[in-house]
Amino acid sequence: MAKALFIIMAFQCLGGLIVTSLGLLFPGPLCGMLLLLTYLMLSGGPEKELNTAGDALVAHLGLLFVPAGVSVISFGDEIIGNLLPLAIAIPVSTALAVAAAGLAASASASGRSVGRAVVEESSQP
Amino acid sequence: MGPFWTDILFWLPATLGVFWLASAFYKRSGQSPLANPTFLSIAAIAALLLLTGVPYETYSDSVSILNYLLGTAVVALAIPLHRNLRRLRGDWRILSAALLLGSATSILAGTLIADQLGAATAITLSIAPKSATAAVSMEIGQLIGGLAPVTACLTIMTGVTGAVLGPLVLTGLGIAQAEARGLALGTVSHGIATARAFSESELTGCWALVAMCLNTILTAILAPLVAALLF
């Protein structure tokens, strides 16, 4: 387990260092994820131990996120002051985006099944 | 020395205990997205902090290990992403079409609707990264001039609404293929809808997971662009 955690945390550290030293507008852990992905592709995939540790961490994302979510108690006023725009923008944009992504995927999928024809979104039911 | 809840050692086990109870409730509810354990735990801990009058800083110091491990878990997403990219035999075109349209629609529709309805600029910017997985969306929100905790909260809302409404929208549009459904759910509503996608089928879930990871990267690129160009 120590080796697996070492690998993941070393990439976390490296990702953070790269982002800060280059002054990038990019999240450090995400940079670490891209580095780990590259490492996995080059090394031919994770060992069993790394798989187990990675899956355990990912399975607990919901728990690990709780403290960050709780910080919203300091911003109650901002949320209440903008409640109406938020209550409309979030569900409407979410439903629109699911529809757009789903239509785009099924349009390009049916494009594939009929050969190389370009199928536009409007041809979908 | 104050009561036990002011002790630095109290809040870490309290958080784990609350999450454990919330997870049990989530399982009992038949894994309804409305009973999302993260959302329930945040609400319960926030209520406990307000009741006991413990400042967020005290809480945050006590659970800082979880914040650190949150970053570790984001890095670890590369492992299931790598596994699923290898296993799934998909078409690069379908994947990129769904990702680009889903991601751009979420960012643009979210920010433009809120802006038109008169939301404050910091709030509008907090909305932009809401389709990325919460741990990362929060950081993107901060980077582009939004409020990280607000982004965190809105991201969870996006996950819950996408997990509840998403399957209905897709069915209403006659989209039945596992690949398209998984890609749409994972792109727009990250982990919460990915859990929902796994309850439809293993294949739907795997596509959702790939879409969630890739859209998190895409949002980190698109949200700052939209923020710079429009607001």
Image (cartoon, coloured by chain):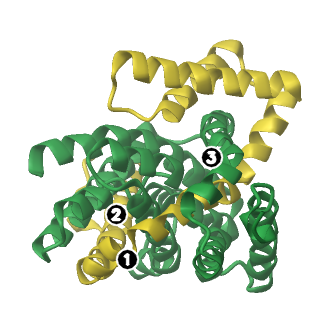
Chain colours: A yellow, B green
| Closer to the camera in the image, B84 or A51 | A51
Left-right relation of B169 to A34: left
Q: Residue, x 66% and y 42% (percent of image)? A: B73
Residue under numbered circle 1: B173
| Closer to the camera in the image, B139 or B202 | B139
Which quadrant holds residue B89?
top right
Residue under numbered circle 3: B67
Do discs 3 and 2 share a chain?
Answer: no
First in residue order: circle 3 vs circle 1: 3
Compared to residue A73, the image places residue B11 above or below, namely: above
Q: Mark 3 near mark 1, Cβ–Cβ under 8 Å? A: no
Residue under numbered circle 2: A103
Q: Please give the chain letter of the residue carrying mark 1.
A: B
Which quadrant holds residue A50?
top right
Q: Please give the chain letter of the residue carrying mark 2.
A: A
Q: Secondary structure at mark 1?
A: loop
Percent position (x, y) of residue B209?
Answer: 59, 51
Q: Nearer the viewer, mark 3 or mark 2?
A: 3
